Amino acid sequence: MSVPVDYYVLLSMALFCIGLFGILTRRNALMFLMSVEIMLNAANVNLIAFAFYHGNLTGQVFALFTMALAAAEVAVGLGIILVLYRNFRDVDVTVPSAMRW
Amino acid sequence: MAPLIELHSWSALAPTLILALTGLVLFVFDSIDPRSTNRSALAGISTAGALASLGVAVWYIVAGVGDPTRRGTFDLFGGQLIVDQMALFFMVVVAVVTAMVSIASYDYFLEHAYQAEYYSLMLLAATGMSTMAAANSLVTVFIALELASLPSFALVAILKTNRGSVEAGLKYFLIGALSSAIFVYGISLVYGATGYMQLEAIAQNLEGAEGFSGLLGLGVVMLIGGFAYKTASVPFHFWAPEAYEGAPAPISAFLSSASKAAGFVIAFRVFATAFPIETMADIGIDWTLAFVILAIVTMTIGNFAAATQENVKRMLAYSSVGHAGYALIGLAGLTGTGSNDVVLGAAMMHLLVYGFMNTGAFLFIALAEYWGVGRTFEDYNGLAKQAPMASAAMTIFMFSLAGIPPFGGFFSKYFLLTGAIDAGLLVVAVALVVNSALSLYYYSRLVKALWIEEPVVERDSLTQPTGLYVAIIFAAVMTVVILPGFGPVADTAIEAAAAVVP
């Protein structure tokens, strides 16, 4: 392999942390969704790099599944964000706060 | 005795397939008559499907499917799915909760515009939960988990013009998306360390993963995060009070019973099969310790927060977090010493009994919302005079949740306690007893409000919606009847657990 697998893991961990940082700091629900997508794609990078490293295809096939599921998740998420906007006239995730303990 | 008809091996998945088929039938019904609000037909189809699934699963257990000494377990699709006793046990839990919630929804969603969508989403979520019971590979675990989660997000937010429901749906979705990203990253790390996704194959290749123990450990921690979300336990429990409070009450019942049980079955199977504790301890990853801490923290947080609530639905939501802590003992007790099958079996029994008593309790909340009596303890004052039967059922649920002897909840807690002591987890056993005692305070507070207090405001006479009453009475009867029938249930659960524990 031309590039050692360590570098791929570093790349994916960097992506994962960027996504996590986005989730913790962003208040816009759409940005939140994008950050989750970055985290899911970090896992995909890992899966494909490890599939190459181990020489079996399980990881690559699972990466395809992950992409499909991520798309399904975004579809449901956008639907929820749409009703959020209709009810609150905003897509800020901190606005709906009627329920607190 | 030779079977009369030789069935194909994938027919072992029949309980799951029936749920999926019912969901699709509801879609067909909806596409033929999109504006239909024929509640009887829709609730009838979905109840019939859930009951058929329940019947087949019970029949399989009785006939010995999954029992290694009788018909054997069924490995399907190259070991991606497995039908053993534990899978069938949890398919029963999911199917029975789905049936009760379907019947109750008939009355609750009286004037809802999207009837068919509601029932088909619920059946699809149930299909996902039923598949989770059989998943035997990290791939199928993740896909089944998403199949259960995605319809649940939509179901929580289904009251589109109700701000509480939308807020609950948003919070549930955001935490769900985050935790599924963490979960899939954990899967990728475990795959990287071992090179396999199938659970037995992971266990066989753990020795080769010593060089990657850091990756593997991080992966295991992330998997625990994913399970914690699905079972509403610490550290991903904070969505639960919001989602259960804002969601329509039948959906709260569905998520807090069936979804939690399904989350536990994948946790049990993944940790018992893929990460045997002896091998993992050699690598330096002692995951039972993590579950000991999580169990204690979860039950303590859940019960203390429940004790301070004024809103009954929110109290039940926190009590549901507390019960997740009790069931976590099943994983904390897999220390390799003591009788592992008893403690895991006890957790399975607790989830079954919980499926009845907790669903029933949330359906009583649904009944109260249907009457429009209000949300706080005070609003429930004196309900027993107007609706004695439902209040008696609620009293049974409350005392059973607290673990008072004559009801089902006592026995499962008793088994958990003996299992924890057997495994040498005295701290956990003490935490279980202390928390149960505390929980009696807020459960009996509701009972007192129902029977003893005088109503704050005058109420009109209350109607008796058939569907809700049928579901609540059935749950109450099962909570009581499970006591004399506890012998066979306990045997099945412990036998099923013994087959999974290495």
Image (tube, coloured by chain):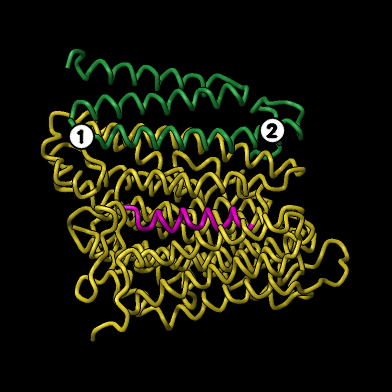
Chain under numbered label 2: A
What residue do we see at 41% from left, 45% from top?
B143
Q: Is residue B122 magenta?
A: yes
Task: Give the chain coloured yellow.
Answer: B
Both on one chain, marks 1 and 2?
Answer: yes
Q: Which SS class for mark 2? A: helix
What residue do we see at 46% from left, 78% from top?
B482
**Mark pair 1, 2: CA separation:** 41 Å
The 10 Å Cα crowd at callout 2, few under 14, some 14 to 19, many 20 or more, is some
- Contact flag, marks 1 and 2 (Cβ < 8 Å): no
Q: Can residue B431 be seen in this snapshot?
A: no
Chain under numbered label 1: A
Tell me the magenta residue range: B119-135
Q: Which SS class for mark 1? A: loop
Please tell me the colour of chain A. Answer: green
Quadrant of the image for the N terminus of chain B?
bottom left
Mark positioned earlier in the residue sequence (1 or 2): 1
- Please state if B171 lies on the left or on the right of B64 as rendered: right
Main SS category, magenta section: helix
Residue at mark 2: A82
Q: Which mark is residue B69?
A: none
Task: Say what amino acid the circle numbered 2 marks.
Answer: Leu
Residue B329 coordinates in the image, percent (x, y): 34, 55
**Residue B444 figure quarter:** bottom right
**Foreground of the two, B440 or B368:** B368
Residue extending furthest toward the top = A2
Q: Which mark is residue A56?
A: 1
Quadrant of the image for the C terminus of chain B?
bottom left
Residue B233 coordinates in the image, percent (x, y): 45, 46
